[in-house]
Amino acid sequence: MTMSSNDAIRWDEKYQDERYHTYSEPRQFLIDHTHYLPPCGMALDVAMGLGGNARYLCERGLSVLGVDISGVAVQRAKCNFPAIMAVQADLNHFYLPPARFDVIINFFYLQRNLIPELIRALRPGGLFLIETMTKQMLEIKPDISPDVLLATYELREMFSNLEIITYFEGWTNSRENHPRAVASLAARLPMEKCKGER
């Protein structure tokens, strides 16, 4: 497996920084949608980080595969939350089996060409939760690459074939109480999308 060494090194350095240790806590958007989670099944945490979201899913009865490019993040997640199946991998070269996951979560990681693969990896009736930053962030952080920021309503368009439960675009506060422009979406893959496929 080929891995982007620059990305791995950059994220390893971030996760060694004490300021990033708050990422071992679950995201509020996930907590707010707890009642939509199934009582059991298989979940995927994309760009897992330190495993806070994955742990939250494990505690609610799900088996969780967490994937991250940072070896530091994966090691810490495995150490702190042994129930997580944590894997270090470059998502550009990671095989996602079709119709495998009951829940997929993706927080603050935008890889546009991966979205269709993630949707295909969702089981009929499966839940997808995603939240990441929008181009409004350029108003306060003009140094962020626009490539990792969503355009207005772009996230909604990406998931237009799913049943959208929640959609939000606007400003929120981060854990560190800094303003953050985000798009947040909760959606289900309709059961009829995969009728006859077994």
Image (tube, rainbow, N blue to C red):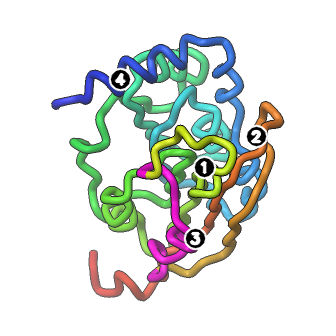
Residue pictured at 44% horizontal, 40% vertical: 65
* Residue that mark 4 sits on: 8
Residue at the image position 29 percent from the left and 35 percent from the top? 90
- Disc 3 residue type (three-letter): Thr
Q: Indicate which disc, 4 or 2, sits on the residue closer to the N terminus.
A: 4
Q: CA distance from mark 4 to mark 1?
A: 25 Å
Q: CA distance from mark 1 to mark 3?
A: 13 Å
Secondary structure under tag 1 reads helix
| Number of the front mark, 3 or 2 | 3
Q: Position of residue 170 (x, y in %)?
A: 73, 62
Taking depth in this image into account, of 157 and 68 the one nearest to the observer is 157
Q: Which mark is residue 138?
A: 1
Gap in Å between the C-alphas at discs 3 and 4? 30 Å
Q: Position of residue 91 (x, y in %)?
A: 31, 42
In the drawing, what numbered circle is on residue 174?
Answer: 2
Circle nearer the viewer, 4 or 1: 1
Whether the residues at callouts 4 and 1 have beta carbons within 8 Å, the answer is no
Lower position in the chain sequence, tag 3 or tag 2? 3
**Secondary structure under the numbered disc 4 in the rendered image:** helix
Q: Which mark is residue 94?
A: none
Looking at the rendered structure, the kind of residue marked 2 is: Ser
Q: Are marks 3 and 4 in contact (CB under 8 Å)?
A: no
Residue 156 lies in the magenta-colored region = yes
Q: CA distance from mark 3 to mark 2?
A: 20 Å
Residue of label 3: 152
Asked if labels 2 and 3 touch by Cβ distance under 8 angstroms, the answer is no
Category of crowding for the residue at label 2, using alpha-carbon neighbours closer than 10 angstroms: few (below 14), some (14–19), many (at least 20): few
* Earlier sequence position, callout 1 versus callout 2: 1
Contact, CB < 8 Å: mark 1 with mark 3?
no
From the viewer's perspective, is the residue at label 3 or at label 4 nearer? 3
The residues colored magenta run 147-161
